[in-house]
Image (cartoon, grey):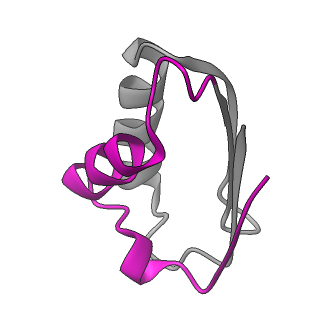
Amino acid sequence: MEFKALRVPALTADVAGELEKLLGDLSGVEQFTITLETQELSIKFDENQLRFQTLAQKMANVGCSLHDIDAALLL
């Protein structure tokens, strides 16, 4: 499964750093990209190992809540 977020105002350098640590260590995350210049985030994950609700909660804990995302897709 893939989660793509566009126009994420909360995606500052500090939040991006925390997200990188989180996503790098989170079981089930297969690949991710964070682009500060365009405030975009893409996360590929195995839904059998990681539920989307869990991913969203952990992202919120490091400062990137779904409420702060202007546009997103779950593919």
39 vs 58, nearest the viewer:
58
For image coordinates 38% across by 81% down, the residue present is 67
Q: Percent position (x, y) of residue 20?
A: 47, 31
Q: Percent position (x, y) of residue 53?
A: 37, 50
How many labels, in total? 0
For image coordinates 45% across by 63% down, the residue present is 12
Range shown magenta:
46-75
Please say if 36 is above or below 65: above
| Magenta residue check for 65 | yes
Q: Which residue lies most toward the front here?
A: 48
The quarter of the rendered structure image containing the N terminus is top right
Q: Percent position (x, y) of residue 14?
A: 36, 51
Q: Which residue lies most toward the left here?
A: 61
Q: Which residue lies most toward the bottom here?
A: 70
Please say if 70 is above or below 40: below
Q: As drawn, is 35 to the left or to the right of 15?
A: right
53 vs 34, nearest the viewer:
53
Q: Percent position (x, y) of residue 39?
A: 66, 67
Please say if 47 is above or below 62: above
